[in-house]
Image (spheres, rainbow, N blue to C red):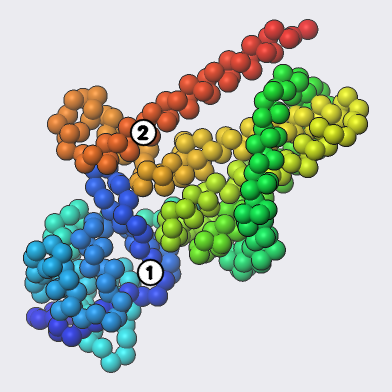
Amino acid sequence: MTVPSLPARYRPALRAGVLLSEPLLHGPDLVHLIKNTGSGQSFKVGPREHFLISRMDGTRTLEEIGADYAGRFGRRLGDSHWRSLLSLLGTRDLLARRPGSPDAPGDPAPGTGSAAASVAGSPAPAAAATAPGAEPPAGRWPLRGSVRLVADADATAARLHRLTRYLLTPAVLLPLLALTVLMEATLLLRLGELLDGTAALFTAPALLLAVATLLWLSTALHELAHGVLAHHHGGRVSEIGLRWRLPVAIMYCTVDDFLHLPRRRGRIATAGAGAAVNLLFLLPFFAVWALAPLDHTTRQAVGALLLLGSVQAFTMLLPLPPLDGYRIAAQLLGATGLAASTSAYLGLLLRRSPAAARYPRRARRAYAVYAAAVALTLVLLAAAASAVAHHYLTNAP
């Protein structure tokens, strides 16, 4: 329908379950992610659109929101601007309909997206996209597929959180982390012995299977840890399941609203929880390896578990997509699409394009830091690979 004039008393309200993110770098721009948890869709808007949308709580009228906008940005919005924005939100199913309140504008005319962008003079909202970390619909095929393991993943995460939340208290967590640092320092000093034990492991099929099973269990705990920490910081777990790409099968835990967790610290903790649990999982085995009187073969197998488990954990912390370390880097730098944005910025620099100079200082600094972190990571990986190869070559029979 056509709405010639919007009532100033209309009080728009976002539908329950709509999530708004903090400002994030995306290319040269600052954007906010808006997610409809009902449909699972998300899209990006600029800071000015976010200013308006974040005030649509059902208590403010259009007149009041418009006055706030004029006070902040120095311009008032006309009916056509409001109609475009509200129509866009309506077609995304983001607006609640409350009995007794005037209806929001109806279906938008063609070109609504660009019209809505003109409200704030910033880029138009991006097309709806699957939320970060969301899994494809469950399905089963002979060689690849996925299946949900629990009917209510969020309730399962809540139960696990109740059972393990004492581990998240500083009195327990800090000593565990200190023991983990001690373990890794000791393993580093005994690296040659561990490398020899790992090589020997591949000549003992039964022990190799036992170590592989324990590493798989560690991977499952890794995924559950993401869900528990997300719940701890106010997030929601949508799926816990099993995904297979034969011959490999792994568990997964999907936190759909990761980017919408209330605090950056919570998002970083959620991303890093998996690797932390991988290392904590190794502590009992480290105690056995360091203190128990083991025969030579068993000691080598336990040492191989410690080495491979540590490599598993630290690999997940590398700042490369799609690893957990990449999510941590993106949160530390306040960006979404960090790798793609960095690549685009570096491409402009290499071509000496004037567009590179138009990136704001915050964006230039963030992308330069990430590029340096990736370069350093690759150098360290190459050095580690070279050191391992040198060890095996010089100690070959």
**Residue at which label 1 appears:** 18
Q: Say few, some or many: other residues with alpha carbon within 10 Å of mark 1 (under 14 / 14 to 19 / 20 or more).
A: some
Residue lying farthest bottom? 100
Q: Quadrant of the N terminus?
A: bottom left
Q: Where is residue 128 in the image (x, y as percent from the top left)?
A: 33, 58
Q: For the residue labelled by badge 2, is the local secondary structure a helix, a strand or a loop?
A: helix
Q: Position of residue 231 (x, y in %)?
A: 56, 62
Going from N to C along the chain, the mark reached first, 1 or 2, is 1
Which residue lies at the image location 55% right of the left edge and 46% below the top edge?
272
Please identify, in this view, whether the residue under mark 1 or under mark 2 is nearer the observer.
2
Report whether residue 253 is seen.
Answer: no
Report whether residue 6 is seen.
Answer: yes
Which residue lies at the image location 27% right of the left edge and 74% below the top edge?
56
Which residue lies at the image location 26% right of the left edge and 68% below the top edge?
53
Q: In this view, does 294 lie above or below 162?
A: above
Q: In this view, does 88 lie above or below 58?
A: above
> Left of 265 or right of it: where is 303?
right
Determine whether label 1 and label 2 are within 8 Å by CB. no
Q: In which quarter of the image is the C terminus?
A: top right
Q: Where is residue 82 in the image (x, y as percent from the top left)?
A: 16, 72
> Left of 280 or right of it: where is 62?
left
**Residue at which label 2 appears:** 369
> Left of 327 or right of it: where is 11?
left
Q: In this view, does 151 lie above or below 255?
A: below
Q: What residue type is labelled 1?
A: Val
Q: For the residue labelled by badge 1, is the local secondary structure a helix, a strand or a loop?
A: strand
**Label 1 – label 2 distance at C-alpha:** 32 Å
Which quarter of the picture shows residue 205?
top right
Q: Position of residue 264 (x, y in %)?
A: 43, 53
Q: Which amino acid does label 2 sit on?
A: Val
> Left of 10 or right of it: where is 332?
right
